[in-house]
């Protein structure tokens, strides 16, 4: 007789945050080397946030599916249209960062949401295009930290501190890898 399946499977509503956290750790530490995954993670994060705005009370499965589809589209963009993908991921990451900074330091800036997002997006896109390696390291560290923090419950003060610590860990880890890869190329 075959082994019985467990009576209760883990709830689907935990899937998106768990996947987001795992992808966040990978992006935090290897975002520059796995550029396509970084773009896919940004697409995934956007999908998670957009699903409730496009469908009234989406099921966890629908939200996860929407996030995975946008992540897949992001990965395809990164592989085939790199410069366009660089500008798009820079724009979205810069916009998300600007919103996070505004929320952390200004508080409720809802009336300026789109202005903050667009200005941050333009700055992020320009940074990523002009300073690709360093901007990608910095932005992928922030995206990774954001995805990790989206999956954990931390008090607001702890969120800011943990975000900064995670970004520093990501930048230092990726910077070390960047230095090692440039040394290998120079030899």
Image (cartoon, grey):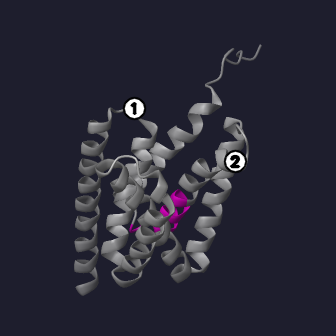
Does the magenta portion include 127?
Answer: no
Task: Report the residue marked by disc 1.
Answer: 153
Q: Is residue 34 visible to us here? A: no
Binning the other alpha carbons within 10 Å of mark 1 as few (below 14), some (14 to 19) or many (20 upward) gives few
x then y, percent, for residue 127: 36, 77
Name which residue lies at 55% across and 73% down.
Answer: 78
Residue 85, quarter of the rendered image = bottom right
x then y, percent, for residue 12: 64, 31
Give whichever of 31, 185 is nearer the camera: 31
Side of 165 relative to 78 (left or right): left
Q: Which mark is residue 65?
A: 2
Name which residue lies at 36% across and 57% down.
Answer: 142
Name which residue lies at 58% across and 49% down.
Answer: 49
Location of residue 147 with respect to 152 vertically, above or below? below
Where does the C terminus fall, quadrant-wise?
A: bottom left
Does the magenta portion include 41?
Answer: yes
Give whichever of 87, 155 is nearer the camera: 155
């Amino acid at each position: 007789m075959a082994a019985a399946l467990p009576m209760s499977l883990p709830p689907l509503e935990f899937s998106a945050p768990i996947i987001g956290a795992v992808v966040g750790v990978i992006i935090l530490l290897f975002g520059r080397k796995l550029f396509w995954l970084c773009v896919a993670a940004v697409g995934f994060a956007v999908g998670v946030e957009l699903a409730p705005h496009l469908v009234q009370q989406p099921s966890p499965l629908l939200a996860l599916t929407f996030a995975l589809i946008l992540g897949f589209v992001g990965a395809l963009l990164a592989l085939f249209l790199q410069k366009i993908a660089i500008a798009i991921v820079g724009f979205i990451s810069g916009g998300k960062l600007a919103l996070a900074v505004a929320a952390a330091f200004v508080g409720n800036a809802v009336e300026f949401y789109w202005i903050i997002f667009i200005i941050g997006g333009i700055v992020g896109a320009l940074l990523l295009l002009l300073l690709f390696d360093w901007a990608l390291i910095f932005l992928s560290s922030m995206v990774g930290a954001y995805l990790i923090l989206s999956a954990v419950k931390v008090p607001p003060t702890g969120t800011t501190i943990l975000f900064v610590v995670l970004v520093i860990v990501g930048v230092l880890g990726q910077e070390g890898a960047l230095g090692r890869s440039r040394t290998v190329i120079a030899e």
